[in-house]
Amino acid sequence: MTGHPLDVDLADLVDGVLEAARATEVEAHLDECLLCRLKRRRLEGTPAPAPGGSPLPAPAFDVMAAENGVEPAVDDLWIAGTDDRLLVLVRSVAGDRVTAAPVTLDVGAADEETVIVEESPFRTAVAVHPALAMEIPRAADLRSMRGRACAARALDGWGDLVLAEQRGWVPLATVDEVGVVLVVFDTPHGLEDELDFDAARSVLTRLNASALVVLTSELGETADVFDAAALHAGIDMPSGTHSPPRPLISGLVAFDAVAKFLDQHSGARAMSAPTRGPVERVEVADVLREAAAAAAADLARQGARFKIAPKRRGYESLAGADEAIAAALATAFEGGSVVDKLQGLAGE
């Protein structure tokens, strides 16, 4: 998911009526976004605590940035993060790990687990969220964060990858965690045209990588992550229109993008190395038919949730039409008009 979910999505999630796939995306975003978690708690109607809250050690409130070289100390208020900056209160320091609780100025969004501190250098009360405290590394080190299973190595050159050399790309590193391999490199403008994507596919294939982490340091600090599928054009559903290649992950700094991809693809689910040899042929049309049929059947089942009769009838009208919808979408591979097929189906 790119960006924050809409307020209506958060409201539907709280009400239990958000479509299952979208709910999964929103929950994944909530795991990472403090602001949206606070919004959800506000929508849930959780009452704010009385002024003063529960006791905490008095924060020193020395506002520091992580890059200024000062060592963190308990009860210091720090500015953490690189792209998205966040105030945190240091609760404990142990070696290269720091336990910190997020701090916000939005006292109105506080709940019963929030501590309100009336005096701060901001001339207003602040809200400390000890229940959301987490352990973080003092420095952005993949090895210290992910353990010995993760290995990062400098990528000194492109070797015989002529296309990457011609595009002016700068190789930076490879990251390997339990057979999930990422290649990190910098570009003048990211991946923009078919020549860029041809070069990117050659890097992915030649270096036997699972995905590419593409930086554009001259234009911004964020990175895009592409796997093999994301480097090719796709088909949007249900319109059937062709869409250009687009990243799996975007809008994060490179360190966070790498960590997020590894969270999704390594660990217990990737204890054995991915297959490197030939694979069986996959009929894309058959995969699309199965996915469309399953999606239509799922939408029909959701109809019972809605209290507005026209909306409920609209969802329930899909019952029994899953195969017909799948067949209509499959015309995208036969040169036909998906829109015409769906309009004909609606008329029936």
Image (tube, helix red, strand yellow):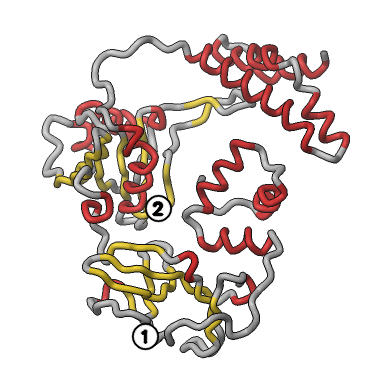
* Callout 2 amino acid: Leu
Residue at image x 31%, y 43%?
Answer: 213
Residue 253, relative to residue 131: is it above or below? above
Amino acid type, mark 1: Asp
User: x, y (%) of residue 13?
Assistant: 66, 48
Give residue 252's mark.
2
Dot placed on the residue nearer the N-terminal end, 1 or 2: 1
The answer to the question of whether label 1 and label 2 lie on touching residues, with beta carbons closer than 8 A, is no
Query: Local crowd at mark 2 within 10 Å, few (<14), some, or many (≥20)?
Result: some
Callout 1 crowding tier (Cα within 10 Å): few <14, some 14–19, many ≥20:
few
Task: Give the residue drawn at x 22%, y 32%.
Answer: 163
Q: Alpha-carbon distance for marks 1 and 2?
A: 28 Å
Image-based side of 279 in relation to 163, left or right: right
Q: Secondary structure at mark 1?
A: loop
Assign the C terminus to one quadrant of the image: top right
Vertical order, 184 against 278 (above or below): below
The secondary structure type at the circle numbered 2 is strand
Instruction: Work out which residue is located at the far right of the displayed protein and give it.
Output: 309
Q: Position of residue 116 (x, y in %)?
A: 56, 81
Residue 28 at x, y = what percent?
51, 47
Mark 1, residue position = 62
On the rendered structure, is 93 left or right of 88?
left
Q: Position of residue 225 (x, y in %)?
A: 36, 41
Q: Nearer the viewer, residue 37 or 225?
A: 37
